[in-house]
Each structure stands twice: as structure tokens, then as C-alpha cells.
Image (cartoon, rainbow, N blue to C red):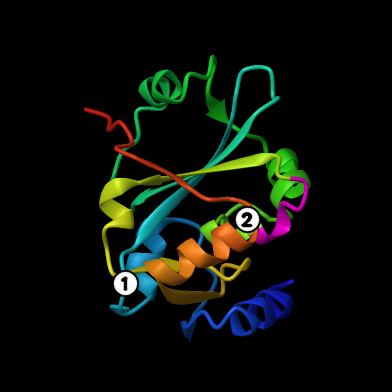
Amino acid sequence: MEHALYRLLDEQRIPYQRFEHPPVYTCEEAARLIPDLPGAECKNLFLCDGKGRRHFLVAVPANAGVDIKALGETLQVKGLRFASSERLKKYLGLEPGSVTLLAAVNDRDHQVEVVVDNALWAREAILCHPLVNTATLSVPVEGLARLLAHTGHAPRVIAVPRRG
């Protein structure tokens, strides 16, 4: 999966810098184990509605606390909640700890909606796992926009509601 992603990035002429590291499962672990990399650190959430019919891949700045209820209201979705690891595997082909904007390439049936916080999207580059949590890519936002458009997942860029 990871190698297919690199081939797609190269085919689409999307530049990236790759950094290998020990497995990381949280933003806090990443901050401790990974040196300063060129790009915005982000937190990725995989969410679904109360009935499990709609799925969302949400990216926000790493230090942002997301108000899930308010986000549901913004997206006009009832019962927005974290999706299970089984749903994560089914819809994005990922294991917990590897959630990334780049996973849109695995959603060939277009079952997942991509939402990106406008503060994150305003950055020059975003740090993303390449479908595994043992490496991080720094990808220019312009390149991410092209990749997501290529996969049919043009992101909805909004001010994601914050907690507190």
C-alpha cells in the first residue's frame, strides 16, 4: 500500500520529503520522537454519523481540540462520533495510529468525505503518514489539493469548531 502511494505521488508529480521514525500512535508521541520537520503537524480523526452511513476524514492542527458535537452541527450530521477500527480498516484500509489525509487514495468508492481545518490548509506544507505510522511525509498543500482532487476527494475546508 505504502509503495503504491509513492508511485501515485510520483506519477502525479507531487513533491514530498520522507522521514522514517519509530512507530507513533499519538500527536504527543510524534512530537517526542520526530525531529522538527518542514510542515504543519496535524491530527486526523476518522468519524461517522450516528447511523454509520456517512464517514469523515477530518484534519486539524495537532494541538487543536475538536468539538465533535459542534462539528456535527456544522456538517449537518446527527450523532457524529469516532468510527470504529473496523470501519477505519473497511473504508480507508488503515490501522489505528496511521490515519492520514493521504488515505483518501484507498477510498475508491468515495464513501469518505474529507474535511480540513482552514488554519491547517493555510500552511505551506502538511505532515502526513504515508498510510503507515513509521514514516512521515512533508507534502505541500498545493500537492495535497491535487492528490485529493485526483482521487475525487476535494476537501471541504472549514473552521473546525474547537473544544473549550
Instruction: Please report contact status of discs 2 and 1: CB closer than 8 Å, yes or no.
Output: no
**Span colored in magenta:** 105-109
Q: Which residue is mark 2?
A: 104
Decide whether the magenta segment is chiefly helix, strand or loop: loop
**Residue tagged 1:** 39
Task: Name the residue: 56% across, 56% down.
Answer: 97
What residue type is disc 2 on? Ala
Q: Nearer the viewer, residue 58 or 19?
A: 58
Taking the spot 71% from the left edge, 44% from the top edge, the residue there is: 110
Label 2 to label 1: alpha-carbon separation: 20 Å
Mark 2 or mark 1: which comes first in sequence? 1
Q: Describe the element under mark 1 as helix, strand or loop.
A: loop
User: Which residue is located at x 34 percent, y 63 percent?
Assistant: 41
Q: Is residue 55 left or right of residue 156?
A: right
Q: Position of residue 26 (x, y in %)?
A: 45, 56
Tag nearer the camera, 2 or 1: 2
Q: Position of residue 77 (x, y in %)?
A: 52, 19
Going 21% across and 27% down the picture, which residue do you hit? 164
